[in-house]
Image (cartoon, rainbow, N blue to C red):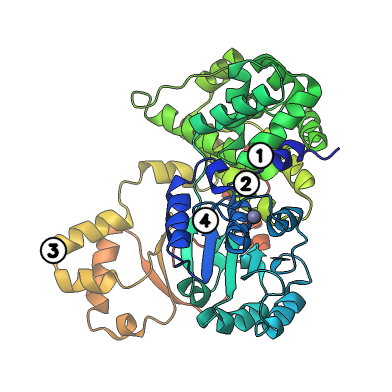
Amino acid sequence: MSYLVLARKYRPQRFSEIVGQNHIVKTLINALKRGKLSHALLFSGIKGTGKTTVARIIAKALNCKNPEDGYEPCNKCSHCIEITKGIFVDVIEIDAASNRGIDQIRELIENLKYAPAKGRAKVYIIDEAHMLTKEAANALLKSLEEPPSHIYFILATTEPNKLPPTIISRCQRYDFRRLELKRMIQFLQEICLKEDYEIELSALELIAKEAQGSMRDALSLLDQAMAYGVKTKEDVISALGWHEEVLVEEIAQILLERELKKAITLSRKLYERGVDLIYLTEKLTEFFRTLFIAKVLPDEISLTFQNPALREAFISASKEELLLIFQSLLKDLEVLKRSSYPQLQFEILLAKICEFRKLLSIKEVLHKIEEISSVLERDGVTPLASSLRRESKTWATFLENLQRETLPLYALLTKIPEPEITASEIKLHLKGNEEFLKSTYLPSIKEKVENYFEKPLTIVIENEKRVTIEEVKERPEVKLISQLFSAKITNIQLTKE
Ligand SMILES: [Zn+2]
């Protein structure tokens, strides 16, 4: 049996039955009463907020033989009954997401000139209108501009920003809002009463919360809950197993504890259960952002965890660790959204975080550098790290001094890249800095640099040649760092042009 059973059974058939969206219903009723309904309407809003339902009620209101008060469909006349069944010739529904979209639009435009066959008005309901091809949208545009008086267009879309502005500007727009939690719970309660199904209020609250403002989602979740015989909040969690907060916390704990095996098992389970992995990853990313911020600003954010083990893991996690996981999730979320294999991508995403080996804080990194220095000194290699540590003279401090001393020289130097300061010399790499090379100030700059750093200044004129990974790997300091961190060089990037 289809899980849409409840949604179909309780689909509103009159304006008075519509749940929420009061602002829209009121405006539409007024327009219908005065016979002033716009011939091109645009309904936007997330799925399951009643866009198509309202469109069908309008179609009925325009074609009903005996509308109450001039707008409310009677649902008894043959026109109303046929529209409800979806077989009325003058109400045409087009799903722009299907391949038939363009053909149907062409057919539509050809048929515009004919009067309605049975009713008073021809109503075209175009669902997922943002999916129209460019050709179809262009063909439609002309008709939207001056629709014949017997024609009404109702465009429904979840993504209005993807519609051409020329189409939007020709329509009267109505934004369908997410349903309020309270209103949704109340409606679910009414349905359970009608269905004679007993369930705790807290269970319905959880279902409504999970539906995120979409009545259709709420009803299909209630369908599932009823199928499992769910009565309590705990039943909902164990039977449906997807409850967001619980699930997000479970994954967060696995990631913080680097439990690769658990991560993979859970990932499979989630996929089998049909959990929306993109949505889940979004929630997980948000959660790690909150964790990170709570770590940085503990006085401003107080966290409450359902899971005490996660609390422990959070306390022992470092700022760097949380930031790294947050960053990684954010980056992979985009990949996941585009992936044709979301379940595999999700698995990779979890595995990657679990395999971040041991994450090092800045303090630990500094400690490692000390270690590198002592090894280098012991081996008689140029003590790069220790000289870095001792070196208080940097290019920045040099520029700072120079700025105080002579502004023209300072101004000239800010236009060139930062030189490389090695143990034995100052190496300035230039490409295309002709102005600087021709400057009469060059000798005095050389002198000032050499005096400050007590090292000779060499100017290297470079072509566009870039450093290769192979070259970098051969440098002694890189070799040592690779060894100490058991690191692999995958990419080199210039830090400053
Ligand atoms: Zn009727």
Q: Which of the marked residues, 3 or 1, is nearer the chain's N terminus?
A: 1
Task: Quarter of the image for the C terminus: give it.
Answer: bottom left
Left or right, residue 296 beside residue 141: left
Q: What is the residue that sits farthest to the left in this orientation?
A: 405
- Position of 296 with respect to 253 (left or right) is left
- Mark 4 C-beta to ligand 1 under 8 Å: no
Q: Cα distance, mark 3 to mark 1?
A: 70 Å
* Left or right: 40 as drawn, with respect to 233: left
Q: Position of residue 242 (x, y in %)?
A: 70, 29
Q: Residue at x 38, y 24 (%)?
A: 298
CA separation in Å, label 1 and label 4? 29 Å
Badge 4 vs badge 2, beta-carbon distance below 8 Å = no
Can you identify the residue that label 2 sits on?
A: 48
Between the C-alphas of marks 2 and 3, the distance is: 69 Å
Query: Which mark is drawn over residue 71?
Result: 4
For disc 1, the neighbor class at 10 Å (few under 14, some 14 to 19, many from 20) is many
The disc label shown at residue 217, or none? 1
Three-letter amino acid code at disc 4?
Answer: Tyr
